[in-house]
Image (cartoon, helix red, strand yellow):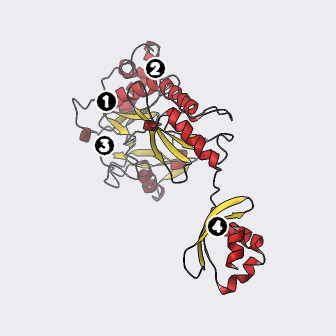
Amino acid sequence: MASMLVKDNPILLPLNVEKTVYDGFITVQVRECQQVVRVTTEQRFHCLFPNLYWEVCLKKLPKCYSIPPPQYYSQLILEMETLGWDKLLFIDTQFQILRMKAEDSSGRQHILTINLKSKHPAEAPECSADLPVPLLLKWTPQSSLNQLYSQFLLVIEALTEFWDVLDEIDAKTWILEPEKPNLSDTMRRIAIANNVSIKVEVDPQHPKMLPECCLLGAEHVVTPLRNNLNANMHLWNPDSGVLQNLQDVLEIEFPSPATHEKSMFSVECGICYSYRFEAAIPDQVCNDPRCSQPFHQVCLYEWLRVLPASRQSFNTVFGECPYCSKPITVKTAAQKS
């Protein structure tokens, strides 16, 4: 039985003297799969129907690794020598997942992940990177990793101005959200004052244009800022920095790390008494100027929806502030804008 097993699968090697345990590769349905084979007396019928047995085993495996042909590896080495081994950060044990490092003109570090197919270069690889736009790279059977990498450099260079804009905002203001921005993040929530902030959504394709803005805070504070924004939109100058433009149209100066401590803007929720709750920070504020207590959206919603006096209309719950009992509203989490 053992001899028949080795004859059908010549790259199976015995691991013990009894030749009951083998390690190596078996060929099933034109696929070579690495397996440890343990032969017992009850399994002698496997040799009578070897193809059927291994096909059944193959279906039971969570994933059977398909080994690329030898020319795959020689092609990969040749392409890496052309591209430069110094750009390689990681390669997995199957030589199919590569992580390449790249740098834009502003000195930011980027990582391009390439998942090669076993039919490389005939089949296009899967590529991913931390970008604010979809990564669209062209590939033909005549393409190479060097050409793919060159396309990636052009993509990140086209986004350099976008990242420059956000870097200036990050350096000169207090960012409330996201806590740790990624290269793919396009939104910044900038602190204006205690319980007052603005969310800006920067367009990666047109980073110097007026971003989408959403002011957050008590109405008596936010309304004048919103009026300034609407009245001064025509003053927006694409040749100036986004941060300076925002300050000009809002007629304010953003608190900066040089002049303010971040703790001044890290006010706890009036219900759960914490600043961050499941990555969210308080963004609901009582509109009464004498109260102005901040709450997490989810905390305020859960508080109001169980009170008998509260009522809900569509996606908005109407109730009373837990602190001053003045009217307060909150949108449901699913509908929150």
Per the image, the residue denoted by label 3 is 291
**Label 1 with label 4: CB-CB less than 8 Å:** no
The residue drawn where x is 51% and y is 33% is 83
Marks 3, 4: nearer the viewer: 4
Label 4: which secondary element: loop
**Label 3 with label 4: CB-CB less than 8 Å:** no
What amino acid type should be assigned to the residue bearing mark 3? Cys
Label 2: which secondary element: loop
Lower sequence index among marks 3 and 4:
4
Per the image, the residue denoted by label 1 is 171
Query: Percent from the top left, x then y, of residue 323?
Result: 32, 50
The quarter in which the N terminus is drawn is bottom right
Structural distance between the alpha carbons of marks 3 and 2? 37 Å
Quadrant hosting residue 55: bottom right
Looking at the image, can residue 132 be seen? no
The residue drawn where x is 27% and y is 29% is 256
Lower sequence index among marks 4 and 2:
4
| In this picture, residue 56 sits left or right of residue 94 | right
Marks 1, 4: nearer the viewer: 4
Q: Nearer the viewer, residue 175 or 20?
A: 20
Per the image, the residue denoted by label 4 is 61
Label 1: which secondary element: helix
Structural distance between the alpha carbons of marks 1 and 4? 51 Å
The residue drawn where x is 45% and y is 34% is 187
Q: Residue furthest bottom?
A: 41
**Label 3 with label 2: CB-CB less than 8 Å:** no
Query: Percent from the top left, x then y, of residue 321?
Result: 38, 49
